Image (cartoon, rainbow, N blue to C red):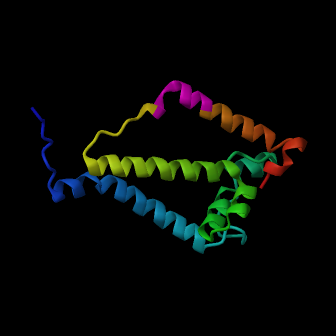
Amino acid sequence: MTSTVPLRRPADRLRSVLAPLGVAAVAAAAATYVAAVDPNQPGHYPTCPFLFLTGLYCPGCGSLRAIHALGHADVPAALSLNPLTVAAVVFLVYRWAVWALRSWQGRPVRTSLAHPAYLWGLAAIVIVFWVMRNTPFGHFLAP
């Protein structure tokens, strides 16, 4: 006895990937804008409020310039500006691909990454990165 999986109609497949495609379109538009409008030129983007008020780098400082460098396929420059952002981009692209594929296949998307242990681990990584980039021995992490 064999079980048959009902075939999905093309319209159902397309409808199931509308959300991933919408997210990809918004992300591509934002990345294209940042790649086109150079954040290294003053006046194009606002100053980081945390840096402005404290003189210290936040975990996101250098992210726009890193995205700009990635938009120009300059990975070493992006890594020197904000390695955490580059790692986040790689992770987010991977998770988007899994989401799009599972949606296309009609399979549920697992959200096991929202487990508290993962969230606490991410928070710890961000805090350690934040503190290290503002210390003399972590100066290589500063943008």
**Which residue occupies 58% across, 67% down?**
34
Count all numbered tags in the image, as a single digit.
Answer: 0
Residue sitting at the far right? 136
114 shown above or below 70: above
- Residue in front for this viewpoint, 80 or 126: 80
* Left or right: where 92 falls relative to 61: left
**Which residue occupies 67% across, 31% down?**
124
Q: Position of residue 76 (x, y in %)?
A: 72, 62
In the rendered image, residue 77 lying in the magenta stretch gets the answer no
Q: In the rendered structure, which segment of residues is drawn in magenta?
A: 113-121
Q: Give the overall secondary structure of the magenta segment.
A: helix
Question: Residue 80 occupies which quadrant of the picture?
Answer: bottom right
Q: Position of residue 28 (x, y in %)?
A: 47, 64
**Which residue occupies 89% across, 42% down?**
137
Residue sitting at the far left? 1
Residue sitting at the far bottom? 36
Question: Residue 129 occupies which quadrant of the picture?
Answer: top right
Q: Which quarter shows the C terminus?
A: bottom right
**Which residue occupies 41% across, 63% down?**
25
Q: Position of residue 12 (x, y in %)?
A: 18, 53
* Left or right: where 17 falls relative to 131: left
54 shown above or below 35: above
* Left or right: where 2 falls relative to 94: left
12 shown above or below 44: above
Residue sitting at the far top? 117
- Residue in front for this viewpoint, 133 or 9: 9
- Residue in front for this viewpoint, 101 or 69: 101
Q: Position of residue 1 (x, y in %)?
A: 9, 32
